[in-house]
Amino acid sequence: MKKNDPTMSKEKALENRIIPYKMLLEGVSTTHALVEGILPEHGIPSLKIGLENLISLLKDLIQKAKEGLPVIGHHFSFPTEYLYCFDCVPVCIEATSYLMAALLPNGSEPYYDLITSYGHPFHTCTSQKGTMGMTMDGLFKFDAIITPTAPCDNTFASYPFFKFHENVPLILPDLPYLKAEKSIPYYAEQLRLGLEKLGKIIGQEPDYNKLKKAIEIQNKVHEYQMELFELKKVIPCPVENMLNPMAAAAAIFMAGRPEILTFYEKMLEVAKYRYNNKIYHGNEEKIRSIWPYMIIFFDLALCEWLNREMGMSILFDIFNYNFSDPININSDLDKLFHGMARHGLEAPMVKQSAEFYYPFIEDCVHLARDFSVDCFIFTSHVGCKQFGSVAQLLREALKEEVGIPLLLIDVDVGDRRFASEKVIREKIKLFIQTLL
Ligand code: SF4
């Protein structure tokens, strides 16, 4: 699979620079057909609406790859919409690994194994290992990759693989650790230089009007997200648990595109209807939980099981409670980039990892109070060493300040071989018994 077949048509060869997106399109389409064919009309709206929009997006990106647009890899903390100042096919390294983990029978496991057998440490983050393995297998052919120097050592230690093993140009805007006002102009300059450098590599000038249009869409999305966030304060929660992974996928794959607006408009409609009619997605909401870190990507059915069998709401995970202010697009370029820098510094995981954990703990305590939460479930992801250090401190803070418990689950959120669905569900079941 490493080399292109010389008889392959040029278009096919171009399209085959993003084979995992073709695999994802198959997986998303099959899941969508099942959702449409098996579930009742009002089954799992977030899944149905999310998959529909993912299909539209993947088809478009595959077509663009076929037309020869450059394929640009990026870390999720380099927001996808920033790449729309170019005509390109953005590929989020982390989101690809985990959407694959969610939708394909063996997920990204063959690719984790490939990169591990090459010598990459097994305990690093699977969000990167999946796409690294796919690239090593010749399934991705990137023209360039851009990632900030954040949020973690895994990112920093894994991305050079693309440069040194795969000869992909790697651009590294330097993201400061210091949470201070002077960090904003510094990171703004880094972002601008990064985009200019990227433009030189792919032979395009950044088009800042197109960038503003993509950001304008995200500003609108921010309004919708805030409305949905407020609605989650209501008992029972008017959105299903599945909204969390689908909103995370939307935030990364669909950012800056019309699909994300459709997704949020429809979800808000559902949430408002349920709010007005006090409808819960399941029989009865018995427990309200926050997952301050990630949910389990290889077992999305867990979301449904918790709603329907356990009466447990997941109000949000880390991708669904970090919001930064809209970016001002009606000013000069300096202000635009300042807004983009601020937004980047507030990104999920960057915000928490690039500083000591006191603000994270404070945020969790406030969220627990504001959203009438009964418990926290902390997935301690094996790759994420820095987050692993905070669980006990958070547990103590929640106990002392709010009087609620925290369940800690050691897991790899993208690889079921570390802790299986069965093990995870058993732990949650036992924990629930202590709450009711
Ligand atoms: S999950 Fe943790 S280790 Fe993986 S990219 Fe995010 S911060 Fe890094």
Image (cartoon, helix red, strand yellow):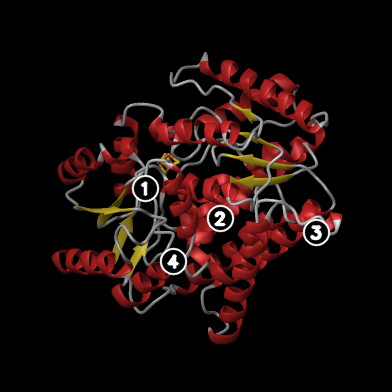
Would you say the beta carbon of the disc 1 residue lies within 8 angstroms of ligand 1? yes
Q: Mark 2 or mark 3: which comes first in sequence?
A: 3
Label pair 4/3, CB-CB below 8 angstroms: no
For mark 1, what is the residue?
Answer: 293
Where residue 360 sits in the image (x, y, percent)?
Answer: 34, 36
Look at 16% across and 69% down and name the residue there. 433
Q: Is residue 226 visible?
A: no
Where residue 177 sits in the image (x, y, percent)?
Answer: 44, 21
Disc number lying in front (1 or 3): 3
For mark 3, what is the residue?
Answer: 12
Disc number lying in front (4 or 3): 3
For residue 362, above or below residue 250:
above
Look at 55% across and 49% down and name the residue there. 131
How far, Cα to Cα, is label 4 from label 3? 33 Å
Label pair 2/3, CB-CB below 8 angstroms: no
Where residue 395 sits in the image (x, y, percent)?
Answer: 20, 44
Look at 28% across and 42% down and name the residue there. 365
**Pointer 1: residues within 10 angstroms few (<14), some, or many (20+)?**
many
How far, Cα to Cα, is label 2 from label 3? 27 Å
**Pointer 4: residues within 10 angstroms few (<14), some, or many (20+)?**
some
Look at 53% across and 35% down and name the residue there. 161
Q: Identify the disc placed on residue 249.
A: 2
Could you say whether the residue bearing mark 2 is in a helix, strand or loop?
Answer: helix
